[in-house]
Image (tube, grey):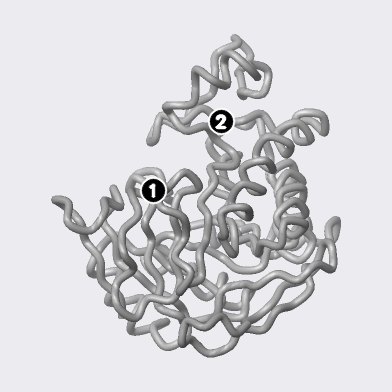
Amino acid sequence: MPFAPAARLSLAPLLAPALALALALSGCAASDSADGSGAAPRKTEASPTTGHPVRPPRAHDPFDYQLGGAYDPPEGVRTVIRDRTAAPDPDPGVYNVCYVNAYQTQPDAVAWWRKNHPDLLLRDADGAIVVDEDWQEPLLDISTDDHRDRLAGIVGGWIDGCADRGFDAVEADNLDSYLRSDGLLDRAQAAAFARLLAGRAHRAGLAIGQKNAAEMTGVRDGIGFDFAVAEECARYEECDVYADAYDDRVLVIEYRRADLTVACREWGDRLSVVLRDRDVVPAGEPGHVNARC
């Protein structure tokens, strides 16, 4: 999701601990299949977790980020990210990525979680639900094997739904929610849950992207991520971390024109970069911003 300015910190100093975690994990990723869209053929490679074929997005393809509502892809765009609930179904002429809020709850879904799975909401020592204050999203409790398995069943159902609707990949958001958990969750738990989601995505024939959390690129092989979605990596000088880890299969979203300028100057010939407004409103609505290198 877009980060509020105060919520986003550079994570480059945390890369060293990720290397230690990498020793405890292990997988790999992919590249570019003919789809009749006029784009160059994409290779179809076996997933690192199941051996099933998945199609990661191709490096440097123009892309659009449409979380606030679906609209016709701008001319030349080959990859589009939309919410799993977005209508209509994915465009057959582009590579479609399905957004899933995997580690936190949407604000309008809190009542459903409270009624059906109250114990899967992260709570502090006083029993209060822990909330990402910038987005008013309660965190999901991934602290135990049982909780991760149950949550993987729920989120996995959403992932299967993405596959059924014709998406090519899934973006599992809020991998870094442990940083907002007041110390109740840690990186190893986030990685363990990500492995479950990657396996579910690959079994459904979908590639899966790492969303943010630059400090976790060192364990991507053990998780099974196939590409990355990075918000403001030019602003926070993290694009190189994602580019190196994912062989340039990185979808970059910047929210300030100055950062788009930097991203295009330093990474425009390698990565897919788009400038969007922070509310990612659809085309034609007030406040809509959309530009690329």
Mark drawn on residue 175? none
- Local packing at callout 1 (Cα closer than 10 Å; few below 14, some 14-19, many 20+) is some
Upstream in the sequence, badge 2 or badge 1? 1
- Disc 2 and disc 1: Cα gap in Å? 16 Å
Residue at 46% x, 87% y is: 38
Is residue 37 left or right of 134 when viewed as pictured? right
Dot 2: few (<14), some (14–19), or many (≥20) neighbours within 10 Å?
Answer: many
Residue in view at x 68 percent, y 34 percent = 154
Identity of the residue drawn at 35% across and 54% down: 70
Look at the picture and state if 193 lies above or below 47. above
Q: Amino acid at mark 2?
A: Leu
Q: Are marks 2 and 1 in contact (CB under 8 Å)?
A: no
Q: Residue furthest top?
A: 126
Q: Position of residue 181 (x, y in %)?
A: 57, 32
SS at badge 1: loop
Q: Which residue is mark 2?
A: 139
Q: Position of residue 244 (x, y in %)?
A: 61, 78
Q: Secondary structure at mark 2?
A: loop
Q: Give coordinates of residue 284: x percent, y percent.
A: 17, 57
Amino acid found under the numbered disc labelled 1: Phe
Tell me the number on the disc at residue 3: 1
189 vs 110: above or below: below
Quadrant for the C terminus in the image? bottom left
The mark tally for this picture is 2
